Structures are given as structure tokens and as C-alpha cells.
Amino acid sequence: MTELTPEVARRRTFAIISHPDAGKTTLTEKLLLYGGAIQMAGTVKARKAARHATSDWMALEKERGISVTSSVMQFPYRDCVMNLLDTPGHADFSEDTYRTLTAVDSCLMVIDAARGVEERTIKLMEVCRLRDTPIITFVNKLDREGREPVELLDEIESVLGIACAPVSWPIGMGQRLKGIVDLITGQVRLFVGARHGERAEAGALLDGLDDPRLLEHLDAQDLAALRDEIELVQGASASFDLDAYRAGRQTPVFFGSAIHNFGVQELLDAVVSYAPSPGAQTAVEREVQPDEPAFTGFVFKIQANMDPAHRDRVAFFRVCSGAYERGIRVKHVRIGREQQLANAITFMAGEREGAERAVAGDILGIHNHGTVRIGDTFTQGESLRYTGIPDFAPELFRRAQLRDPLRSKALLKGLEQLSEEGATQLFRPLTSNDLILGAVGVLQFEVAAYRLKHEYGVEATFEPVNVVTCRWVHGDDPKKLDEFQRRAEANLALDGNGELVYLAPTRVNLNLTEERWPDLRFLATREH
Ligand code: GDP
């Protein structure tokens, strides 16, 4: 216990994950409504509109700018301080999403009741599993005909490999949606649909299935069927277990309709009651408790600023311990230098404000003029390095081709700086002067070409290259590593941090190489 303990206990730092169109934006808006940040609702929508116009460069610029301000939304709810971290919807920006997940203590997973578990959901779940992130599930769009709830639970369990504990249960669906039953308290919340653009009123709260008012909405036969169904579900599925949820083994499942603001408050209440407050963070040297007095934290994301006149980049920093106060002096551990954090940004409901105070779980925006990288740790003197912010092996590779060969220095600088933001990775083959860019989506190459031109005055194109995937190469025996370097030189490169990477021309080649060098480790992720 320290004086920070109660402050930290009030924090809930979480992200919403979903396949595009499941309702993340809509749910975000509704959550902010409860936090009293109503004016934000429009902003989230505007951003979403910009996000879809990806071929329009102005929109893309705008999106990047807006997303700096709405990437972190802090709002009060009940006696908690909620930090909701946004994750980009576009699949081409999934690197950003993975990194953001290293800065949260829990996630809300949104599933479309008609579509069930989708491809991005599976991928995001894999990332959550790397850190056993606790997940609360929200089955959305109950106001439409969807799949049977039991079937959805089965799919989540079998496809995502996590046990489900239904905490609420729908009464009907689509046109027949009458409400939801809280399986823990037994209470029934009646459904009142909101007309388009209106703020939905909460429907009446009934004591339970025996409440006579329920029969005004449901005939006796349907009610009997509902009782049977609930009995069956409760018999067949696990009941909610806080420890299992916190360990990432079980997910409590809620049903609702974000657009009708139905079931949303229950969800937010669950975040307050169940989701963990910031816990201990692992550094290479030791575990750091969130209520330790000395300030520490790490950078999980870097984003270019919208204002082209400034070119500064904002580093997103998660506080892990201690308290930030304006003007605090910190140590930038990687470069071993002291510096003052003069005007960090906090994100009160999307407005950028000078941060007055931030504790574990809170996010700060730090102006970065090129000295800050993803994974960097700041402390008040201690040499700590936080772990667990991985780079993922990119899935697409292209070679940068210059129009004007005299600009090669500027090209290198541009690519290096863009890669520091983490959306692309730069590889320099051992045996050539090529600059190979790796990304998870094609859009990243367009963005890189655009930004090289506008921010670095370099005209470059990105051409196909014979690489399908890459692996970071590790080995305990320096002799074996040496030998590998000599034998496989043509396929080896250094990444932006000078680490050895194998660039595989085919999957088969990668498999063969792994088999041939059993003493070496070929890693698909790289920890900072
Ligand atoms: P995102 O891509 O996950 O951010 O999804 P959005 O929040 O933009 O929602 C995608 C589409 O689903 C939009 O047209 C929403 O209006 C719609 N939508 C979201 N929630 C609901 C819901 O509860 N019911 C219905 N019927 N539609 C919804």
C-alpha cells in the first residue's frame, strides 16, 4: 500500500477489439455517452468516415491526425477513470493494434450476432493470448435476426479456445427482442428500441422472470420456453469465475445492441466490477508494482502528427508506476539521458490537454523529435527495460526504388523514421544495398511513398521482391550462428535495430531452413 494504491485501483485501461463492422465505433460512442463525453460521439463517426476513404490522401492525412486525438479516450465512469484505447479498424494497420494491446489491462471483444467469430477476431484473440489479456465479450446487433445464442457461445469456445460464461441472456432477437435477463441477479431489462438518431431510453428493470409485468411482453408459452432455455444454458456452461476471467481462461458474455444503447451500461458496469486495474509490469530486471512511488513507463506506439508544419511525432506512453506531474525529470533508459517531460498530452475525452497528473494505467502523449522509439522505457533514474512489446513478422515485402539516385541518403532516413512508428519495418540485406520494407498491409506502402514524398522530398516506388515471410534468428551457440550467417548470407538482413533476420523466399524454404538448423531459433515475433 502506498498513497498511489487507491488512485491506481480506480483505473480501467482497456481496448475494444472486433472484426470490422461488428460495431466497435458504435459501441465506443455509446460508452463515451455514459462517461458524459457526448460531444465525442460525432468525432468518432467523422473518423470512421475518413477511415473508409482510404484512396483519398487528404482523408488519410486527416485520419492520422484525428486518430492522434482520439486514439486514447479518458472518461470518468462511476468512481473509476476509464482509459479506452482505440485500435485502427483497417486491417493494414493491425501492427498498431497489436502494440496497443500491450498497453491495456483488458479487452472488450465485440461479436456480430449474425456473423459470429470472424477472421480478424481470431487474429486479435491470438495476440491477447500472448499476454493472457482478460476479455469481456459483447454479442452485438441483437435487434437483428442473428444466430442462436447457444450456437454463438459454442463457436467462441471452439474457434477462439476460451470458455464462455454467459452473464446475460437475450429474450428473443430481431423483431422479437424483448429484453435481456441478467443471469447473476435474475433481473430483466426490457428492450425499448431507439429511433434513428435518438438517444435510447433504458427500458424498465424487472425483478425477475416471475415479475407479472413480463407477461405484458411475452405470452406464457414463450416465458416457459425461456425458462427452459436458461436452465439448459446454465446447466451446460460454466458460471462466471472472476479468477478464470482475470487469467484469460474464461470470458463473460453479454448480449445487446450498441446502436440501441441496449446492454451497454451493463457492459460498462462489468468493466468497472470485473476488469483488472493496472497490475505489476514485467521489466527485464524485475517486476514493477503499479503503486511504487518512482515514475516509470514505456512507449507502445508512435504516430505522426497531423500538422505538416510541425512534423513532430507523438509517442504514446503507458505509465506503469509512480505519478507524472508536469515538468517531471525522467531518464530515457535506452540512450541513458535525463530529460524533462515538459508538456505531455493527456486525452480527456478526445481533447488534447496538458497532462497535470497521470498514474499507472494512464496514457501520455510525448512529443517526439526522433529520439523516442517503440519499446523505450522512461524512469526516474533506474535502468529498467519493459518487455513484451513485440514486432510481428510482416506479411508483405517490397523493395524501395528511387527515382533520383542522389536522394538515397534521404530515402534511408525517411524509411528509418517511418519504421520507428512501427507500421512498417525496414530490412537491409547483408549482401546488397537494397532497402526492403515489410508491412502487414498493402496500404502501408502507399502511405510510405506518400509520406516520403511530402515529408522527406523523396520520390520512391515500392517494387515486388522475392520474400514471403521473415524470422528473427537467435541461437545460443555463436559458432553455429556464424556458420549460418556464412551459409545463408544471401537470405539474411538486418532490421532497424541491427538484429539478424532471415528473409524467406517461400514457406517451403523456411521450413527446410528451420529443419536444417535445429540449434537455431526462428522467431516470428521480436520483443523490443
Ligand atoms: P466497426 O467497423 O466495428 O467500428 O462498426 P460500426 O460501429 O461502424 O458498425 C458497423 C455497422 O453496423 C454500422 O452500419 C452500424 O450502424 C451498424 N451497427 C452497429 N451496432 C449495431 C446494432 O446494435 N444493431 C444494428 N442493427 N446495427 C448496428
Image (spheres, rainbow, N blue to C red):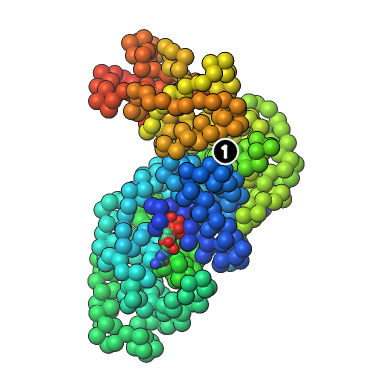
Residue denoted by label 1? 302
Report if residue 378 is visible in the image.
Answer: yes
Q: Residues within 10 Å of mark 1 (few under 14, many from 20)?
A: many
- Near-viewer residue (288 or 423): 423
Counting from the top left corner in percent of width and height, residue 127 is at: 40, 43
Disc 1 residue type (three-letter): Ile
Q: Position of residue 174 (x, y in %)?
A: 33, 72
Q: Secondary structure at mark 1?
A: strand
Q: Residue at x 47, y 75 (%)?
A: 195
Ligand 1 shows up in the quarter that is bottom left
x, y percent for residue 502? 37, 21
Of the pair 39 and 140, the residue shown nearer to us:
39
Q: Residue at x 42, y 83 (%)?
A: 207
Residue 51 in the image: above or below residue 384: below
* Side (left or right) of 443 relative to 515: right
- Residue under the image location 62 percent in, 41 percent down: 305
Q: Is residue 292 visible?
A: no
Q: Is residue 233 above or below residue 418?
A: below
The structure residue drawn at horizontal position 37% and vertical position 71%, both measured from the top left corner, is 143
Percent of width and height locating residue 425: 47, 29
